[in-house]
Image (tube, rainbow, N blue to C red):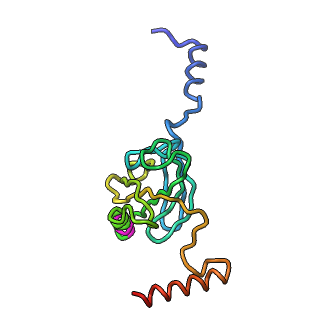
Amino acid sequence: GSLPTRRSLVSAAALLSAPRFPAHAISRWSLPNGEVSLREPTFACGGSSYEAPILLGAGGSGAALSVSPSSSRLAVKGERVVLKVSWSSPGAAAAVRNEGAVLERLNGVNGVERLLGRCDYTAISVGGEPGGSGRVALLLSPLVEDAVDSIGALAEARMQLAGRARFAEIRRDS
């Protein structure tokens, strides 16, 4: 056999050193209770496609992200919705799964968020997750901007007093 020419060696070296880009990018958040990583630019969950995730926050049972529907029969395109991803602990995954079941039963009740869909986290995550991890993801609507999770978080005392009065009224009537 003949030896490779200098030109063929240079061409082979150029091919080997060329930058390689993944088939999809990754959005990844490392949080105190775990990690969330999503396929980009789009991922599918609940029979629809979503994109542009933005972390909203994290709690004891999972992380909440704002996502934009790229194709959905249940959400309005351009209107962001919530993606809630459970942590890997069995208790956290069960709590999020239970939340989905409750919302499914309350579908159509005025003032209650809608469950748009659910999927296994491994279907939307990128690597590192063992198959059958048990983590679940819910898609919820509407996304409420600047929501608070307790009456103490409200800025104005007037609103706090009105909320407390209404709570006492509801409690009294129960």
Chief secondary structure of the magenta span?
Answer: helix
Query: Nearest the camera: 146 or 95?
Result: 146
Question: Does residue 96 belong to the magenta stretch?
Answer: yes
Residue drawn at (50%, 61%), measured in percent from left and top?
64
Question: Does residue 140 belong to the magenta stretch?
Answer: no
Residue drawn at (35%, 57%), measured in percent from left and top?
133
Residue drawn at (55%, 27%), measured in percent from left and top?
16
Relative vertical location of residue 56 with respect to residue 24 in this rendering, above or below: below
Q: Position of residue 43 (x, y in %)?
A: 46, 45
Query: Would residue 136 be found to the left or right of residue 51 on screen?
Result: left
Quadrant of the frame with the N terminus: top left
- Outermost residue toward the right? 156
- Outermost residue toward the bottom? 172
Q: Which residues are magenta?
A: 92-97
Quadrant of the frame with the C terminus: bottom left
Relative vertical location of residue 55 with respect to residue 163 in this rendering, above or below: above
Q: Position of residue 111 (x, y in %)?
A: 46, 67
Which quarter of the figure has residue 171? bottom left
Query: Nearest the camera: 112 or 56?
Result: 112
Count of number-bearing discs: 0
Residue drawn at (40%, 49%), measured in percent from left and top?
45
Q: Position of residue 6 (x, y in %)?
A: 60, 14
